[in-house]
Every structure is written in structure tokens, then in C-alpha cells.
Image (cartoon, rainbow, N blue to C red):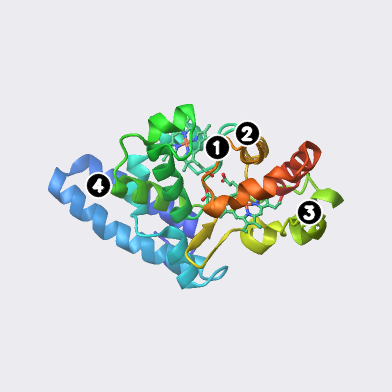
Amino acid sequence: MGLSRGVSQQDIKAVLSTSMRHKQLSHKRWKRNALLAISTFALLASVKSMAAEESREMTAQRLGSGNPLIGKEKSDAGRCQECHGEAGISSDAKIPNHAGQYAGYLVKQLNNFQSGARKHEVMTIMAEDLSAADMADIAAYFASQKPIPGDGSGENPLAKNLFVNGDQARAIPACISCHGDGGKGRIADNITYPVIGGQRRVYLRTQLVNWKLGERSNSPEGVMNKIASVLSEDEIDALANYISGL
Ligand code: HEC
Ligand code: HEC
């Protein structure tokens, strides 16, 4: 299976297809045991292989407590993957990518859709019947995937300046002070700052507009509402273009 090469995405795929084959020829109990054994293997492999880019501890933090292989099954083509993509890359610029997103952030959003703290017609229905374990497993599956880097096409000095430096005059902190370099996300003081770099352009724009209008209000202490409320529409457009290109 080439696990020793430590290329996480391919390895996970190979392990997944093996687990699919096992599934076809086995009865339920055996299937479950095999899946669990294989998944531990895959988890270790992904932890090892991502270590070149980030520490083992950071990778474990990104994946959370769920099981990515069980999450793959639970989010299958008829469900989450139909819109968010089998590889976590969405089918439409309005739909967010989940590839490489922090599991803890995804789980928080699913809980927020379930409780009504975040509203969206489709996602409210999608989240409705997910258990805590379903959320953790599905989130781990998407978190284990490799994000596609943006193509830099939204390069724009105004957006870059806001992103890197903020604007003291309007009390806008730099986006990178929370979302990290390149918007790659981070966990600090028990808050998960989502990956926004490379996220879908129309989705980013919608979220910033929703924060500004107060239609989304689930960030800790309303921080994103405060920030977006002072951004102009042009700045929001420029930021969405720039950040999706990172
Ligand atoms: C019919 C398409 C569709 C399906 C199926 C779907 N989603 Fe979504 N999802 C969306 C859209 C559209 C949004 C953006 C919502 C918004 O604009 O606020 C979204 C947003 C999300 C978010 C928030 C992401 C973020 O970055 O804040 C999560 C988490 C999520 N979906 C998980 C899931 C899971 C898990 C499933 C399966 C149980 C699922 N989705 C099924 C369309 C879909
Ligand atoms: C003080 C910390 C902080 C700063 C500064 C900050 N953010 Fe955020 N941002 C957050 C947190 C926390 C969340 C997650 C909210 C949640 O849990 O729903 C978030 C969420 C977002 C989202 C939604 C992501 C998604 O997948 O739905 C976008 C878009 C975003 N921020 C853009 C920005 C931009 C652009 C800037 C700079 C102008 C910025 N943020 C500055 C803390 C911050």
C-alpha cells in the first residue's frame, strides 16, 4: 500500500479502497473489526506523512477525535460529498471546500446549524440527524484531505493590506492575527480559527456579507460581526477574491 512513502492523500485512498473491498466480501462483525484496524493504520500514516508540513501534534489537533474512514462512509455520495466533494473540494463556488479544514471548526458549525445558532436552509436539514460521533467522523474525513492552494488570481494591494496589517484607524485587526499566515487556520486558547485561504470565492463573500448584516452571528464574542460591520462592500469583494486565491 506504500504507506512507508508517507504520502497521505494517496495512502488514505489506497487504504480506503482496500476497506471497500473488505466490505464487499465480509459479514458485518468482521467488516467492522477490519475497518477499525485499517483506520488506526491510516490515522498513523496520515499523522506521520503530514509531519513534514506541520507537527504531529498540530495534525492530531486538525483531525480531532473522529475516525476519517468511518467518516468517508457516513458522508458518502448521496449525502455531504454530493455538494462538498469526495475530496473535500466543492462542486460550486457558493459551497465551501472542507479539504484540510479543522475538524473542530466543522463540528462547531454542524452543532450551530443543529441548534439554529447558524441558519441555512439546506445545511439545517443536512445537520438535523447527525449524532456527535457522526459529526466527529465526517469532520475528521474532510480534515484529513489536502486543500488545493489558490492560484493567486485575486492579488490586490488593498485586500492584502487589510489581510496582513488590518486598519488601526477603524480598529480592524489583521486577518492573519487570528486566521494565521496565508489564512491557513490555527487553534489558540481553545478557539479554532478556520482555514479561509483558498476557500471558495462566492462562499467567502457571502459569509462576510452575512457577518456584516448580522445574518450570521455565531463567532466567539461576535468578533466577525464587529470586523465585517466596518468593511465596505468593495473591501469585502476584494478580500473574498484575494483570500480565495491564497
Ligand atoms: C445540497 C448541497 C449540500 C449538501 C448535500 C451538504 N451541504 Fe454542507 N453546505 C452547503 C452550503 C451551500 C453551505 C454554505 C452555507 C452558507 O452559505 O452559510 C454549506 C456549509 C457547510 C458547513 C459550514 C462550513 C464552513 O466553512 O463554515 C459545514 C460544516 C457543512 N456544510 C457540512 C456538511 C455535512 C457534514 C453534510 C452532510 C451531512 C453537508 N454539509 C451536506 C451545501 C450542502
Ligand atoms: C480576533 C480574531 C479574528 C480576526 C482578527 C478575524 N477573524 Fe475571521 N473568524 C474568526 C473566528 C473565531 C471565526 C470562526 C467563527 C465561528 O466559529 O463560526 C472566523 C470566521 C471567518 C470566516 C468564515 C469562514 C467559514 O468557513 O465560514 C471568514 C470568511 C472570516 N472569518 C474572514 C475574516 C477576514 C477577511 C478577516 C480580516 C478582515 C478576519 N476574518 C479576521 C476570528 C477572527
* Mark 1 Cβ and ligand 1 under 8 Å apart: yes
Please state the horizontal and vertical placement of residue 112, each as a whole percent of the image. Answer: 43, 43
Left or right of 56: which side holds 16? left
**C-alpha gap between disc 1 and disc 4:** 28 Å
Give the residue at mark 2: 93
Residue 19 versus residue 92: which sits nearer the camera?
A: 92
Callout 2 amino acid: Ala
Picture quarter containing residue 176? bottom right
Callout 4 amino acid: His
Does residue 128 show up?
Answer: yes
Give the residue at mark 3: 170
> Which circle's residue, 3 or 4, is located before the other in the chain?
4
Viewer-nearest of labels 2 and 4? 2
Give the residue at mark 1: 90
> Which mark, by number, is residue 22?
4
Within 10 Å of disc 1 (Cα), the crowding (few <14, some 14-19, many 20+) is many
Within 10 Å of disc 4 (Cα), the crowding (few <14, some 14-19, many 20+) is some
Please state the horizontal and vertical placement of residue 124, each as a whole percent of the image. Answer: 42, 32
Assign a secondary structure to mark 4: helix
Q: Are marks 2 and 1 in contact (CB under 8 Å)?
A: yes
> Which circle's residue, 2 or 3, is located before the other in the chain?
2
Picture quarter containing residue 200? top right
Left or right of 219: which side holds 17? left
Left or right of 161: which side holds 204? left
Viewer-nearest of labels 3 and 4? 3
Assign a secondary structure to mark 1: loop
Please state the horizontal and vertical placement of residue 182, each as a whole percent of the image. Answer: 68, 58
